[in-house]
Amino acid sequence: MATTSKKFHTSFQTGQSEHFVQFCETDAFLIDSVSAFIGAGLRAGDVVIVLATKPHTESLEERLKGDGLEVAAARVRGQYVSMDAAATLSKFMVDGSPEPGRFAEVVGSMIALAAQGQRHVRIFGEMVALLWAEGNRAAAVRLEELWNDLGKTHSFSLCCAYPMQGFGGEVYKEEFTEICQQHSRVIPAESYTLLSSADERLRAITLLQQKANSLEAEIAERKGAEEQLRVSENRYRRLFEASKDGILMVDPRTGTITDANPFMTELLGYTREQLLGQELWRIGLFRDREANLEALRELREKYVLRYETVPLHTKDGQRRQVEFVSTLDQANGHSVIQCNLRDITERKRAEEALLHLAAIVESSDDAILGKNLEGIITSWNAAAERMYGYSAEEIVGQPVTLLFAPDRQDEFTQIMARIRRGERVDHYETVRVRKDGTRLTVSVTISPIKDSSGTIIGASAIARDITERKQLEAKFRRLFDSNLIGVFVADFAGTFLDANDAFLGVLGYTRAELLAGTMQRDALTPPEFHSLSQNAVKALQETGASGAYETEYLHKSGRRIPVLVAVTRIEQTETCMGFVLDISGRKELEKRKDEFISMASHELKTPLTSFKGFLGLLQRRLTTQGDEQALHYVARMDAQVNRLTKLVNELLDLSKMQTGQLDYREERFEVDALVQEIVENVQGTTQTHRLLLEGQIGAEVCGDRDRIGQVLINLLNNAIKYSPWADTVLVRVAKDQNKALVCVQDFGIGIAKEHQHKIFERFYQVTDSEEKTYPGLGIGLYISYQIVKRHGGRMWVESKKGEGAAFQFTLPLV
Ligand code: ADP
């Protein structure tokens, strides 16, 4: 320090008013400089006032003492005054600015007091430096002005000292100039002041000029760079604000959002404020916190993270798909994460729809192909490959006319002319050629394809192979036109829409009448058959076919026509096709057959009765004569007559049943007794089988005892007849609730399932090879069934082929 003080060249004139400023780089230099100024004052007999910080005051006084000055004595004499700069400052500062009145009062009165006795006053002040250091630069400049104002009324030398480092920066340029201007003298800081020779100073000035120049150049450059940065920041900000991607800035240390652009807030439905400070998983971006942390870890490792599709849940619960790209970068020495989210929900939907459509096209059974306006094939689905035999690789790029039959080539020009006009060609039936040269009949629909501007750029063709349908149609047409059978098409409501001549012939109508819609099913059906046609329609709706049923139609003349009808639904329509067979002839024949049976059985009955009577007489006579041989023959004749009588009786019963003339008696009788009686009787006629009777019910039924007996006889005879190798027949009587149940079980040939419901029909006999050998008419079970039914009972069979049969019937108990 001593050395610097020796080099210190600045001279301070005494007795002269001035306001100068000393800049300094170090405290040591400051003390050097100020002590020279104050020391010179004390030596010259001036009054000195020190308004400095406590440390500076102490260092200064130390130095003065070191320079041989009696500071304490000077203070006592009133020649040396020291005040704390900050404390003094606080006396006149009002609202961060020096208040002129108070300043004048505080500082002015201090100077006036010191200047008494015409003594010169030297002041070292640091109040401005304090204000400057605080950043209250305006107040510092203002205080300098007030000092200058005070200098107009008071005489004093004022040394202000500022640390040079307080002015480092372009921003201080103006204020620095201002400060300098407020002083009558400016003393540079020590790096200049301490130079001893003029030559050295000139060099220093040159060096400083050079430094200033380069600094200015640097500043200009920096300004340019800053401007550029500002421009690019602005541009980035605009992009950020206007981007159609959601952008989030995330702090990599905390993983929380530091910024979000408007699109992001819109996408998520949160306000920017709600987003800031949140972790990504909280705003629906990752599944959970763990997934979020994992993503951040990965990002720290790879610096870039890209997810093709991330599900995103918006605030209002919508699910959206986003493409997510996140980067980790350095900016201003900080790491930042930027996440870009692109809403691809619509794109995904469109892609899915497109895929869906493509899958439909690919899985279609119809050939679907695309072509441009020149007729070059541009797309080809799997069905097209199957139908025409060309693979997509082979045919795409080829002209569509490759598929056209040689004699149909001109179709192309006609079709394309319509397509160019924007027209659609609907269900156009034509012939095409497969790769192997075979022909197929197709139904094609061709529609124009337009681009986004509406310009027609090609066409799509959907073709269905109708070869088979055509062949089927032709076959059906032949059947229809052959008129072997009546065929009609009708709707479910019952209007005949189409019919062949055979059908019209059956009913006596003309085609014109049919086409006029006058043929209505209900009007053409006698009322008692309406329920049959309704059942048929129901079956059509449920199963697609009615099955054959007999009904009657009304001929135009009013005559009834018995017909056999079968109806099938025409696929996926409310219409049906019916086949009608006129069975008048068959019905007539049946009627005649019934009449014959009735007549024949009546006619046979009388001679048979007298035959039986005479046989009885003959038997009695031969018995008296004791002619055993003849008696034997008569007994055999009697058995045959009994068989014949049975047959004739059955036929007679049958025809009576047909005409409703069979009479039934009404009487109460015991089931147990009847069954026992019949079993004993039938047992008397057979030596081959034992009839075992089980069960008793002790109950009565009401009805015709003989007819029920006839049923039982029938069943027992059948049981014996159809079990030639068995020796037992079981008869069981039981009570089932309020019904009597009678069961006749044999161990014979049994009945296959398919015959079981038919054996109760008239004349039905099982005609498989085995059964053929058994004689009979096939009417016994029919009669039995009708008798039981007439008594309010039910009859059925349980059997398996080869395992015997169990015929059962019920009768209501009284
Ligand atoms: P039929 O006079 O032919 O016996 P039915 O009406 O009594 O006439 O019987 C009808 C048909 O039922 C018979 O032809 C026979 O094929 C079958 N059937 C009847 N009873 C039995 C039985 N117990 N076992 C096997 N088949 C039987």
Image: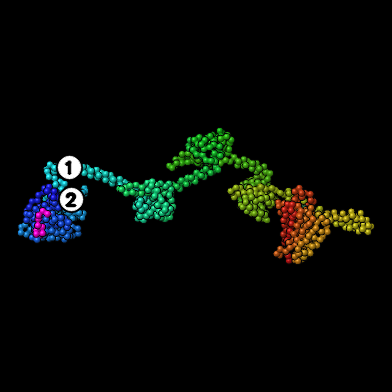
Relative image position of residue 308 (x, y in whole percent): 43, 46
Residue displayed at 82% across by 56% down: 686
The residue type indicated by label 2 comes to Thr
Relative image position of residue 40 (x, y in whole percent): 9, 53
- Residue 72 within the segment the image draws in magenta: yes
Estimate how packed mark 1 is, as few (under 14), some (14 to 19) or many (20 or more) residues with alpha carbons within 10 Å: few
Instruction: Work out which quarter of the rendered image holds the C terminus and state it.
Output: bottom right
Query: Under 8 Å from ligand 1: the CB of mark 2?
Result: no
Residue that carries the numbered disc 1 in the rendered image: 207
Estimate how packed mark 2 is, as few (under 14), some (14 to 19) or many (20 or more) residues with alpha carbons within 10 Å: some
**First to last magenta residue range:** 66-75
- Residue 777 within the segment the image draws in magenta: no
Residue 761 visible (yes or no): no
Q: CA distance from mark 2 to mark 1?
A: 21 Å
Residue 103: which disc? Answer: none
Give the mark nearest the N terminus, 2 or 1.
2
Q: Nearer the viewer, residue 734 or 132?
A: 132
Label 1, secondary structure: give it: helix
Residue that carries the numbered disc 2 in the rendered image: 26
- Horizontal side of residue 724 vs 757, given as left or right: right
Relative image position of residue 639 (x, y in whole percent): 85, 55
Above or below for 135 versus 368: below
- Quarter residue 811 falls in: bottom right
Q: Nearer the viewer, residue 167 or 1?
A: 1
Relative image position of residue 50 (x, y in whole percent): 13, 57
Kindly report which numbered mark, 2 or 1, lies closer to the viewer in this rendering.
2
Label 2, secondary structure: give it: loop
Q: Main secondary structure of the magenta part?
A: helix
